[in-house]
Each structure stands twice: as structure tokens, then as C-alpha cells.
Image: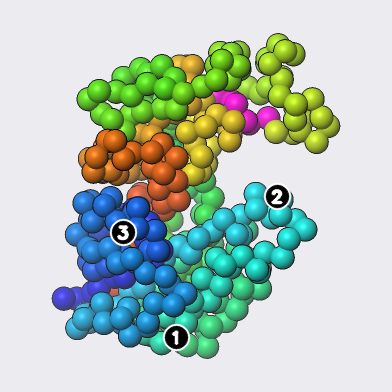
């Protein structure tokens, strides 16, 4: 086989699926979360391996590449530690004590020991502000990699959500670049219009992933008084939350808000099923977006299966799987960038 890809921190396979759509041969995905295994295996041609990246033997990862001519190691280390939200909430906490902090160092250790030909890493933009990222890049340079990293605005690549991510590409062969933006803009309407309408707490009998969370009576009133793109200032005073009545809460204008049909959605996070977590209200129906709608905004195809038995489908778990994923179409762009690079160095 010409190339083999191993996906670290693979989750339910958003990055893997995108790389496969780009024509790359992904042989395995590793993740500590066993609840991701069904979705990963069911939708991809590679195999899921439950593994703690901080301790999984490098020899086992190296063996996954077999006799591939080109070894490609990719991954998105858990990003919550480096996110702006985490830094804001835990501003007086030593984030280096978070167990997830050193997973990027584990990634670097695999690179140093396996010496893959191509590396790709995706994470939150805030990662570039930390020494751990600078050390990661220096480790790559000391191992003779050409490095390119940038903050990617996913909207400019045709993804239907306002999502910015740090994308790093590295190659042993030559300088490597991410493909330029395609200029296409997709909106909430482009991907969600035409889905069967739902009431809060309801699911579609023909599509069990098209399911949304229930709302308390007061939250139902809040969403009814919310305008697409509006704020809590559109509500009657009796619906204001305690935090909105404080000076410290007046800037939280997105919570309980509705999306706009003709703009990309806000960033899909692990709690997109809950209107109190952000602007996750449907543009016109009185509810939060459904799991299906979140998956579509993350560019998962409608055929992607997230659960085996409907009775085991907890909204919070599936929402976490979808929100944590690398958007499939971003994974495809990364994969196509790698393919273009390999074609160029082959004929250089």
C-alpha cells in the first residue's frame, strides 16, 4: 500500500472520514473513549483501538503502518484545556495540572519515535499562545520537518458554521501548504432547510437522530421571545436570568439565542443541544437544534451512524461526540492538501 494514516484522538471519526473522502488510506483510529467505537467502526474503513495516548506503547502505533511506503500521523488532542472558554472559567487555575495538557507532548513523542513522513494536527486557535505548542513545533523542526500552521476560518472553506481552528501540516519531503479557501459560503438554510419540523423534546420517527432536548416552561417562553440573531434584550423582564441582571452577565448575548437562516451557524460545541449554552435555538421553531442538525452543521453525511440501539442514545453523549469531532469537510480539506503535496513531491 502506498500510504497509511493513523488518527490519534479519533473520537467518532470526523477527521478519519474526511481523510477517507480525500482518498487517503486510514488504517486505525485511537481514542480513550469507548463510547466512540461503534460510530467510528460503522462509518469508516479503519479500525478503532481503545487506547490512552499518554501510555499506549509507541511500538504498537508504529506497527499499525505495516509496510506502507508513506506514513501519515494525524490527530486532534483534546482541546478544551486550551480553549478561550476554559481560560476564562479557570483563570486562577494552573491549566498544566489538567491531565489532558500533556497529551500534545505524547503526540510529539510518537512523532519523534515513529518518524512519520507527514504529520497533521488540528486544535483550537488559543493553543498557539502556549509554550507547549511552541515546544511541539520545535520538536518537529529538530526532527527535520517542514512546518506550516495557520488559523483556519472554516466559513471560507465552505463549512456552514463560524469555526476557527489551528491546523498544522508538517512534511519530511518539502514545504507543505493547506489548500486555499474555495470562496464558497454555506448557511444554516443550505443544510437544515427542509428537515421535518419538531417540537421541543420530540424526535422524528423516521430519523431518530433528528431529536431535540426538552425545555422547561420558562426556557420555552424565552425561545418564543427570541429573534434570529437577537439577544436576551428582546425578552420581557420577567424572563431574564439572574446572570443577565448582573453587570457581569450583560455581555452573554448569545445564550438562549436563535441562529439566523442566512448565515453560517455559531461554532458547534459539545452542548449544542442546550439553548442555555449558546446561540443554539432553531431559526424559527421553538426549540434547540436537534442532534441531526448539529451533525449536518459539522458536515457529517446523513448516512453517518452514531448509535446502534435507540434506547442507548443519550442526547448529551451523542452531542459530545458530534461537538468534539473535527468537521468532516475540514478533514477532507486537510486530506486533499496532503494528497496534493504527495503528488508534487513525487514529481519534483
**Magenta residue check for 89:** no
Q: Quadrant of the N terminus?
A: bottom left
In front: label 2 or label 3: 2
Q: Nearer the viewer, residue 18 or 218?
A: 218
The overriding secondary structure of the stretch rendered in magenta is loop
- Residue 112, numbered circle: 1
Helix, strand or loop at label 1? It is helix
Q: Residues within 10 Å of mark 2 (few under 14, many from 20)?
A: few
Residue that label 2 marks = 89
Residue that label 3 marks = 16
Give the residues drawn in magenta, as a range: 253-258
First in sequence: mark 2 vs mark 3: 3
Helix, strand or loop at label 3? It is helix
Q: Is 101 positioned to the left or the right of 305 in the image? A: right
Type of colouring = rainbow
From this viewpoint, which residue is outermost toward the left?
1
Residue contact between numbered discs 2 and 3, judged by CB atoms under 8 Å: no
Amino acid at each position: 500500500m502506498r500510504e497509511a494514516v493513523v488518527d490519534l484522538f479519533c473520537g467518532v471519526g470526523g477527521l478519519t472520514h474526511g481523510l477517507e473522502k480525500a482518498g487517503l488510506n486510514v488504517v486505525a483510529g485511537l481514542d480513550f473513549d469507548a463510547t466512540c467505537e461503534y460510530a467510528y467502526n460503522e462509518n469508516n474503513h479503519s479500525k478503532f483501538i481503545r487506547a490512552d495516548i499518554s501510555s499506549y506503547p509507541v511500538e504498537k502505533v508504529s506497527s499499525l503502518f505495516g509496510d506502507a511506503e508513506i506514513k501519515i500521523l494525524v490527530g486532534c488532542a483534546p482541546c478544551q484545556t486550551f480553549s478561550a472558554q476554559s481560560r476564562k472559567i479557570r483563570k486562577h487555575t494552573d491549566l498544566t495540572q489538567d491531565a489532558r495538557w500533556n497529551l500534545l507532548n505524547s503526540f510529539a513523542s510518537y512523532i519523534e519515535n515513529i518518524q512519520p513522513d507527514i504529520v497533521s494536527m488540528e486544535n483550537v486557535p488559543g493553543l498557539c499562545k502556549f509554550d507547549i505548542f511552541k515546544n511541539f513545533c520545535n520538536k518537529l523542526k529538530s526532527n527535520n520537518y517542514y512546518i506550516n500552521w495557520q488559523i483556519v476560518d472554516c466559513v471560507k472553506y465552505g463549512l456552514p458554521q463560524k469555526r476557527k481552528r489551528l491546523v498544522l501540516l508538517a512534511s519530511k519531503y518539502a514545504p507543505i501548504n493547506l489548500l486555499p479557501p474555495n470562496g464558497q459560503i454555506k448557511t444554516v438554510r443550505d443544510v437544515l432547510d427542509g428537515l421535518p419540523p419538531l417540537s421541543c423534546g420530540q424526535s422524528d420517527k423516521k430519523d431518530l437522530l433528528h431529536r431535540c432536548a426538552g425545555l422547561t416552561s420558562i426556557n420555552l417562553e424565552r425561545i418564543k421571545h427570541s429573534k434570529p440573531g437577537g439577544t436576551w434584550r428582546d425578552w420581557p423582564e420577567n424572563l431574564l436570568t439572574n446572570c443577565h441582571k448582573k453587570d457581569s452577565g450583560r455581555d452573554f448575548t448569545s445564550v438562549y439565542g436563535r441562529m439566523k437562516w442566512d448565515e453560517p451557524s455559531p461554532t458547534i460545541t459539545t452542548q449544542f443541544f442546550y439553548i442555555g449554552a449558546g446561540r443554539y435555538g432553531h431559526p424559527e421553531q421553538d426549540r434547540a437544534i436537534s442532534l441531526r442538525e448539529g451533525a449536518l452543521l459539522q458536515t457529517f453525511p446523513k448516512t453517518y451512524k452514531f448509535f446502534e440501539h435507540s434506547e442507548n442514545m443519550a442526547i448529551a453523549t451523542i452531542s459530545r461526540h458530534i461537538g468534539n469531532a473535527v468537521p468532516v469537510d475540514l478533514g477532507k480539506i486537510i486530506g486533499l492538501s496532503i494528497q496534493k503535496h504527495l503528488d508534487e513531491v513525487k514529481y519534483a
